[in-house]
Amino acid sequence: MFNKKLYTHAQAGDIINVTLDKDQKHILSGTYTARVKTPTPKSVEVKIDGNRSSVNQFSFVDQKDGYDYSLNAISV
């Protein structure tokens, strides 16, 4: 009926830990905590330091449960 795609691995709003092994465009390698912006079939898009990045290896900190959480910046 609808053309909406469902992705079971992550949802928009989930909080995840991301480890970048090498630098990506404007994002330095390191470990970040970020919120999922857009889930895709094989990865998720997150916003790190104001830049969007697509990552496929991450671990969940907190899955979306209907409550709003705030993120504090961490220094690397």
Image: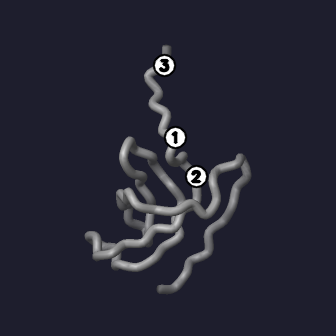
State the scheme by which the image is colored: one colour
Q: Earlier in the sequence, mark 2 or mark 1?
A: 1
Crowd rating for badge 1 (residues with CA inside 10 Å; few <14, some 14–19, many 20+)? few
Check residue 2 in the rendering and tell me which mark sits there, or answer none.
3
Which residue is pictured at 46% across the width and 76% down the height?
31
Residue 9: x and y, percent?
A: 50, 46
Q: Label 2 to label 3, Cα distance in Å?
A: 22 Å
The relative height of residue 15 versus residue 2 in the rendered view (above or below) is below
- Amino acid marked by disc 3: Phe
Local packing at callout 3 (Cα closer than 10 Å; few below 14, some 14-19, many 20+) is few
**Tag 2: residue type?**
Gly
**Mark 2 sits on what residue?**
13
Q: Is residue 27 above or below residue 60?
A: below
Residue sitting at 48 percent across and 39 percent down?
7
Residue at 52% across, 48% down? 10
Which residue is at the front of the view, 70 or 21? 21
Residue 16 lies in quadrant: bottom right
Position of residue 4 measured from the top left corner of the image (x, y, whole percent): 47, 27
x and y percentages locating residue 13 in the rendered image: 58, 52
Name the amino acid type tagged 1.
Thr
The answer to whether marks 3 and 1 mark residues whose Cβ atoms lie closer than 8 Å is: no
Q: Please give the residue where the numbered disc 1 appears in the rendered image.
A: 8
Residue 65 drawn above or below residue 29? above
Label whose residue precedes the other's in the sequence (3 or 1): 3
Q: Residue furthest right?
A: 67
